[in-house]
Image (cartoon, rainbow, N blue to C red):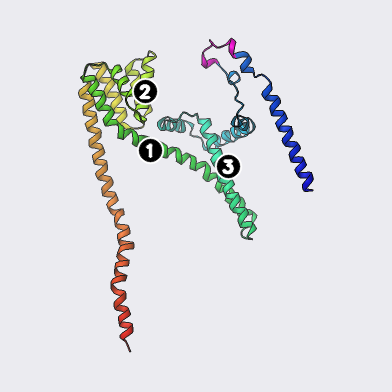
Amino acid sequence: MWGGLLGAMAGIGLILVVTRIAVLRRPQLATRVLPYVRDVPLRDHGPGLRPVSSAPTSAAAGIFGPSLRSAAHLVERVLGGSSSVRRRLERAGLDRTVQEFRIEQVVWGLVGFAAAAAISLVRALGGVGGVGSAVVFCALGLAFGVFARDNRLSTQVKNRERQVLTEFPTIAELLALSVAAGESPVSALDRVVRRSNGALSEDLSRVLARVRTGEPVGIAFESLARSTGLPIVARFATGITVAMERGTPLADVLHAQAADVREAGRRLLIETAARKEIAMMAPVVFFVLPVTILFAFYPGVLGLRLTTP
């Protein structure tokens, strides 16, 4: 029986290898068509005109891709909230679509399902638990994986916004110095973007790209104000737009906004320290104080026991 099983597996493997080699030797549609449509804009290129890679990841995507996409559509219908997910992806700086994020949720759910199934199998081999509890546990593992990816996205958004708040005063001061030195807002933005890196620099680089494609500076900063989830950055973008439209000194506006952000960060630090002060008392009250009392009173109690007749 084992010999027949191993022979069948070897035969299936050889068939898969031969089939894959035959597919790789066949010229792709993109290879034949792309030389004649290179001047067509990229938005007119459909998925069939993209070159197909022969890497193992592309083979796995071709095999499991349709099933994952179907599962992603099911998750989208059950959970919904595609607009919220799209906005959070933009705020997190992730270059993904909603469908790709749903596929990642499905993959995380499958990982949770596999972990729960492994634990259920170990418990079943040990004679603990039944089929019903195993099914419920696997379903909970699947749901946990799906919601864990969503929670991870929210954490990525918070981390990126925290990084933006940390970078904002320095970026604003650099812009103010460049403008005060006589450069135009676009030139100052270009100089700051080229000499800095980080989350806020990426947002400003996208604004600069829109300006270079012909979009007015005010409209580009207004789009930044609409897409960001931080009121400080939105006020910064709106302030630049208003200063350029009404002729307000831009350097003074940027210096004032940088000072406001530093003051807000100082207040936030004081509030965080006040909240952490109560949390710092927990180890003192529940760990250090009982040990101190034990070391202080235990010798006396032991001495009383030894001297009592």
Asked which secondary structure carries label 3, the reply is helix
User: Of callouts 1 and 3, which one flags the residue occurring earlier in the amino acid sequence?
Assistant: 3
| Left/right of residue 156 with respect to residue 257 in the rendered view | right
- Of labels 1 and 2, earlier in sequence is 1
Name the amino acid type tagged 3. Leu
Q: Secondary structure at mark 1?
A: helix
Residue 91 among magenta residues: no
For this rendering, which residue is in front, 238 or 101? 101
Q: For residue 55, which quarter of the picture?
A: top right
Q: Which residues are magenta?
A: 34-44
**Residue designated by label 1:** 159
Residue position for label 3: 110
Q: Image quadrant of residue 163?
A: top left
Could you give the CA–CA distance between mark 1 and mark 3, rounded to whole angstroms? 26 Å
Q: Residue at x 25, y 33 (%)?
A: 261
Q: Is residue 236 left or right of residue 23?
A: left
Element type where label 2 sits in the image = helix
Question: Which residue was labeled with disc 2?
Answer: 205
Q: Amino acid at mark 2?
A: Ser
